[in-house]
Image (cartoon, coloured by chain):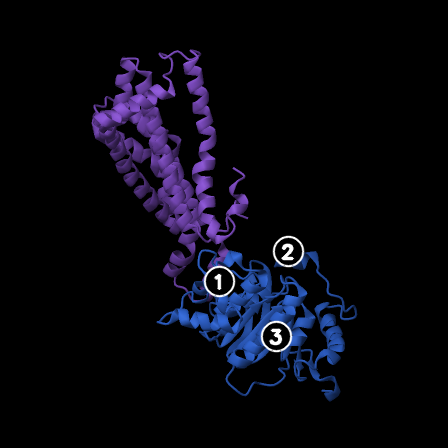
Chain colours: A blue, B purple
Amino acid sequence: MDARLGFSVSPIAVDLPYSEPVAEPVVRLRNFVRRFGANTIIDGLDLDIAPGEFIALLGRSGSGKTTLLRTLAGLDEVRGQDVEVPDSRAVVFQDARLLPWKPVWKNVSLGLKGDKVRDRAEAALKEVGLGHRLDAWPLTLSGGEAQRVALARALVREPKLLLLDEPFAALDALTRYRMHDLVLSLWRAHRPAVLIVTHDVEEAIALADRVLVLDKGRIVAQEHIAAPRGERSGLSGRLREKLLSYLGGDDHRTGVLRFGPLAEAAE
Amino acid sequence: MAVSTWGSQGTSRAVPGILLERIGGRWVSPLLLLLLWELGSRSGFIPERTLAAPSAVIGTLMEMLLSGELPSNLLVSFARVAAGLLIGVGLGLVLGLIAGLSRSGEMAVDPLMQIKRTIPALALTPLFIVWFGIGETPKVALIAFGTIFPVYLNLYSGIRSVDLRLLDAGKSFGLSRWEQVWHIVLPSALTSLLVGLRYALSVSILVLVVAEQINASAGLGYLINNARDFMRTDIIVVCLMVYAILGLGADWLVRTIEARALVWRPSIVEQ
């Protein structure tokens, strides 16, 4: 590892895990396979996520990242496979997926048990800066506000694992940067393990401790970023090129994000 | 009609704005029609034995109201609709829930309902008379029979067209199956159900009109049949008006329910 780079590279992560996390991992996948008919979406994937770790998962359309996220979210059944995910997990989807017929605070407290549910929802909404929209209807929110409500809904559960499925892809650039800051401050405050699925290399570099590149259902590369957030602009150019080259698939020379028609259809 | 579009934006102005829209705006054109009709009768363009003038109709209406003839018969008709609707809507709800929420329920219920749909409710009148005689039962049964389907179909399709992404979100937050149904499926089906309910209400009045022609001894249909025998177009028109008012009342009822139940929907009109 070249210290000047501020990041380390271990391209064949499957065979050479960077280092076993010291603490008991919150997520543990071993030789995970997922098939739809003849299509193998995830092909023998190993993944450990340490408590409080912030991971970005990069991949082209059809690389299997959505499938992987659904598995971690417990939305797909995993029969007879070596998959460990924590019970307390929460997802923020690309579209906020708020229930339009429930006011904001009831969306946040959806499924919560116990008393003082409204107070807990209010506290979570205040944390994302929406304490004043407690009783608003979701359809009256802007895209950024809706996504912040979705974040509050995830955080109010105090998850051990927070899954973010391209949560900012539909937002404008300015709102997206603000959301990055918000996510980081929430992560520092609550310390869940975070897995963010994205196709935005910059976003991955700005947010994560570790960037995984998924291609054809396998992790083809992972990068540990040691440089503190906020001091990453220097390394982002080089790292971006590297990551983009992995995203390019088999042809590592091109460094261009390709969206093959076959890959699109497979997703 | 254009009066209220901008007046209804602020919260303080919303109430009069909506009120104007509901009452003022909607009543302008019918009133104009009445005016033309009255003019036609006054000028002799419309003979009385063809159609009584609105003023004559109103006179008859007052008479019938004061004598108690209209209220008592209206009550009879109203009770028929209410009973029929209660049974029809109730069955429609139950069957719609069964077919919507379970695959085996769908297998059992939906084919029967599709067969039922092909038979117009009114075509069953003779059979119902044979079965139930000529009393209240066939009238109520016809209304019930006619109103099951719109409620059933709209509830069923409303349940089935629930946004799967919302269900996924619910699942990811650990909602149980019944919590998913309660928090996500049923509220999302409500919009569609209310359309079905509105349709059922208008069907119920349509069926009432025909069912009441079956040898009734009370009710609006009875009044109309009598009036026909005496060529009293004024009474006939009064009864038609009452039917119309029943229809409007039913519409108002569903609108009120909608306004309360679907308060979360940003209104297109008010934007």
Q: Tell me whether marks 3 and 1 sit on the same chain.
A: no
The answer for which chain carries disc 3 is A
* C-beta proximity under 8 Å, tags 2 and 3: no
* Type of amino acid under label 2: Ala
The residue beneath circle 1 is: B169
Work out how far the residue at label 2 is from the one at label 1, CA to CA, in angstroms. Answer: 24 Å
Give the x, y percent position of residue A237.
76, 76
Work out how far the residue at label 3 is from the one at label 1, CA to CA, in angstroms. Answer: 24 Å
The residue beneath circle 2 is: A265
Task: Decide which of A161, B10 is in the foreground and name it.
Answer: B10
Which residue sits at x=33%, y=16%?
A: B233
Work out how far the residue at label 2 is from the one at label 3, CA to CA, in angstroms. Answer: 34 Å
Rendering quarter of residue A220: bottom right
The answer for which chain carries disc 2 is A
**10 Å neighbourhood of mark 3: few (<14), some, or many (≥20)?**
few
The residue beneath circle 3 is: A181
* Type of amino acid under label 1: Ala
